[in-house]
Image (cartoon, grey):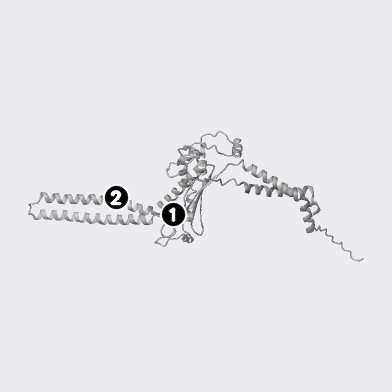
Amino acid sequence: MPDTQPEKTTDTVEISFLEVIGFFKRYLLVLIVAAFLSAIIGVAASFLLAKKFTAQTILLPELGSSRNSSFFSMALGAGSDPSGKLVPELYPNILSTIPFGQYLLKIPVVDENNVSYPSLEHFMTRDSSQSFLSRLFSSGKAQPEKPAAKPSTGDTKILSFTPKEERMVNAARSLVSASVGTNDGIITIESEMTDPVVAAILVEASEKYLIDYVTDYTVSKTTQQVEFLQKRVEESRKRQQSAEYALQAYRDTHRNTFLNVARIEEQRLQAEYVLSQAIYSDLSSKLEQFKIREKEEKPVFKVLEPVRVPLSKSSPKRLFIGIIFSVLGVFVTLSYIIFFKEKLHRKLM
């Protein structure tokens, strides 16, 4: 019997380029209308979102010094350069810490209506400028919250918050963001809020916090030495004055005395006075040197772009939202035509 092998049949559906052109010709008007309507819906929905304003400042830190400190020293993998200065790459981390959030909550603010608040925390709890959607979604979730007791750690250096305080601190520090240019080391501090004046106040407070923190870190050791020397200088000054007074008092009481024992005592007082004077002079010289060093080590920040109250909103970006909705509308319409109207997926199976 001859060998019979089953013939292999493969059904292939070929779609020509002309068919694709014809498909889009038939539904071009539908796709254009869908894109237009979707864009209108997106723009209309953007009006339900709260307007936000972005305030910012741009700082240029000191990237080099006489000690060959450089921004590129971060490549060494250390948190600071050989001079003991923080590299700018770490500055955003400073503005994302819990202490920074606590600092922001305590600063007084004034809103765009010239209403003063004793602290940012009061402004955040009384802020009524939320968007309609946020109020709508939060209204169903708002539940009376029982006051939670703050856990006691017994150590003042360990932070302890209630759940409400934790949320407030995290919300405060999330209001400010910082970035550093990888090539030039320029620092940009931004804050986006519904109130432009409060956003500008937060950026200015963040700038001050960052400069103070970096300055304290850089010169803290030298400052401690200055404080130590100031105490020693004051002690040596009092010792010198006491020794001088004792010497002069002894000379006044033994002016006409020619005894050798009196001369020995005078020589001892004279030596004590000379020693105390030398110590005072030496400590005073070292104190002045460390004061000069403290000023030299203080980092320098140049404000390239000062903080200003933004006049134009940064979000929502209605054109961008309209484009996104338009693309989504075309995609949904095209999917409906392919899978439900033309049912092209069945022809390809």
- SS at mark 1? strand
Quadrant of the image containing the C terminus: bottom right
Look at the image and tell me in which quarter the N terminus lies: bottom right
The numbered disc on residue 215 is none
Residue 128: which quarter of the image?
top right
* Quadrant hosting residue 135: top right
11 left or right, relative to 59:
right
Identify which residue, 20 or 83, lies in the foreground.
Answer: 20
Horizontal and vertical percent position of residue 92: 49, 52
Q: Position of residue 149 (x, y in %)?
A: 49, 36
- The residue shown at (75%, 49%) is 29
Side (left or right) of 148 relative to 322: left
Q: Residue furthest bottom?
A: 2
Q: Is residue 71 left or right of residue 340?
A: left
| Label disc, if present, on residue 231 of the rendered structure | 2
In this orientation, does residue 321 appear?
Answer: yes
Q: Position of residue 165 (x, y in %)?
A: 50, 40
- Amino acid on which disc 2 is placed: Lys
Decide: is 74 above or below 38: below
Q: Is residue 15 visible?
A: no
Q: Residues within 10 Å of mark 1 (few under 14, many from 20)?
A: few
Label 2, secondary structure: give it.
helix
Looking at the rendered image, the disc whose residue lies closer to the viewer, 2 or 1, is 1
Q: Position of residue 130 (x, y in %)?
A: 56, 39
Q: Earlier in the sequence, mark 2 or mark 1?
A: 2
Q: Amino acid at mark 1?
A: Lys
Q: Which residue is mark 1?
A: 302
Q: Is residue 276 left or right of residue 308?
A: left
Between residue 185 and residue 111, name the one nearer to us.
111
**Above or below 336: residue 183:** below
